[in-house]
Image: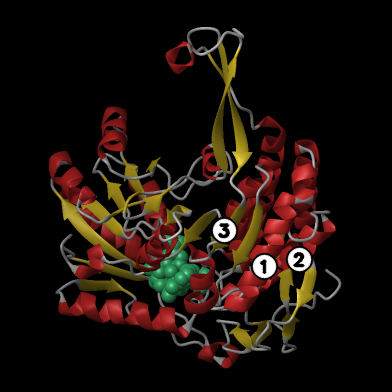
Amino acid sequence: MSSAQPAGTNSTRKYQLLIDGQWVDSQSGKTFTTPNPATGETLAEVAEGDKADIDNAVAAARRAFEGKWSRISARDRGRMLYKLSQLIEEHSTELAALETADNGKPIKESSYVDLPQVAENFEYFAGWATKIEGETIPVPGEMFNYTLREPVGVCGQIIPWNFPLLMAAWKLAPALAAGNTIVLKPAEQTPVTAMELGKLIQEAGFPEGVVNIVPGYGETAGAALAAHPGIDKVAFTGSTEVGKLIARAAADNLTKVSLELGGKAPNIVFADADIEQAVNGAMMGIFFNQGQVCCAGSRLFVQADVKDQFIDRLKEKSAKIVVGDPMDKATNMGPQVSQEQLNRVKSYADIARTEGATVVAGGECPTLTGAFQNGYFYQPTIFSDVKNQMRIAQEEIFGPVVSVISFENEDDLIKQANETIYGLSAGIWTSNITRAHRFAKAIKAGVIWINTYNMFNAASPFGGYKQSGYGREMGKHALEMYTNVKSVWVDLSGKPIGWFGK
Ligand code: NAI
Ligand code: MG
């Protein structure tokens, strides 16, 4: 990354689109800027892709898929993915700084969570490239039947801003391991690290057109990609609202779709839990990444007997959270990603008050000084006396705002926990092992955490039930989304078919 400058300086970085191995301006010549959310200063000026650029990118991806990429061995695909993971590790310090500068997440998180997981995902799927196999099926008669697992083709991938580079890795790595080509559209709020990744993808040796990166707005570039008749699959992570638009657009061409959407996860504390651990887990569940996490434990169910004690401890510990300069290693929470997201969080705090919830902590923007007074910061916020039917318990806030809801017993709890349109994840804190596993079965969600929260690994599947989406990312299940199964029948008898042929 020869052009890398230290993040957080006033010099505006510039990026073009990556199409067919070339860095190009957009057809319209338009650009957009992305701010550093901690200060509001412009971080980068980026070419603004639109339908015409998406058309070019899809055409390039198709040529690569039918051409060069199809002739590259699985072993070489794996080697390129592995090389990419190594390049990411080599550049992880700069990439983490850029992620923090563009997204606002604390440098502690981008350095120790995002970047290691980005590298891990490419490394993990590098190993899969040579292990994607068909099967032989024991069919009756003198017949031989086998399956081929083939790449689906050109994949459109639309990603959000909360884990910009990690979401790119979750989508790119399995798709490339399986031999697909890609048009990736990063979120307009955070395009920077995806563009830097583009440089490393070139350096890792992927042929031109295999990965095309077209930043731009959702309503233009994103919509054009989802509706494009030239793509074979669209993968999306973002809001449930836009997920439905993607599914509708894809329906016209019957393009395959996978969706990873919103959540309103129950994080549940039973009286028999290790309360100190559960308090830490509750904070990890809601304040990590400023609460901008689809699996955030935003509904904190606490058993009535321990509720007051639990809230006191949660309040005490939350007061020690350091909100401020995300580049400072001691910071626990940076700004929200944008003014728009900050407004959304503020409006939900107002809704909570009118709905009759009680502010236990936060509920305001913090007062920061100097460069940070224009940043999009919000305090860690706890509301108690929340009822599960309230809007703040039903709608995704996507900020550092937790709703404490009390419950009496397990039956009452399971019912409330499942009363949501979402089903992405759930957490439970208890020392009762049978209860923990009963709960894991009873909850309609794709990921369950028992006495832990926010655990991820490239080998372990992640995805939703209900309106949290469909399809699984990571692990071997991700390969199912990026491969087609072809069944091949071979006659071994050499005899004519008797049915009509006599
Ligand atoms: P969004 O769903 O609008 O954006 C996510 C991605 O979709 C971005 O790349 C965006 O450019 C693209 N997009 C937007 N409209 C599109 C369209 N019509 N066609 C194709 N692509 C489109 O999310 P937004 O507006 O940034 O945030 C709103 C809320 O969405 C958040 O407050 C949060 O509740 C939820 N969200 C959930 C995420 C998750 O990880 N599940 C990530 C980001 C947002
Ligand atoms: Mg949107």
- In front of the other: 354 or 128: 128
Q: Label 3 amino acid? A: Ile
User: Is tag 2's residue or tag 3's residue first in the polypeptide sequence?
Assistant: 2
Residue annotated with mark 1:
57
Please report contact status of discs 1 and 2: CB closer than 8 Å, yes or no.
yes
Rendering quarter of residue 246: bottom left
Label 2 is placed on what type of residue?
A: Asp
Q: In the structure shown, which secondary structural element does the residue marked by tag 3 occupy? A: loop
Q: What's the residue at 44%, 55% (across, down)? A: 260
**Residue drawn where x is 55% and y is 75% of the image:** 221
Q: For residue 330, say whether it is visible.
A: no
For residue 298, side relative to residue 90 (left or right) = left
Q: State the mark number for residue 231.
A: 3
Find disc 2 in the rendering and name its residue: 20
Ligand 1 falls in quadrant: bottom left
> Which numbered disc flags the more N-terminal residue, 3 or 1?
1
The N terminus: image quadrant: bottom right
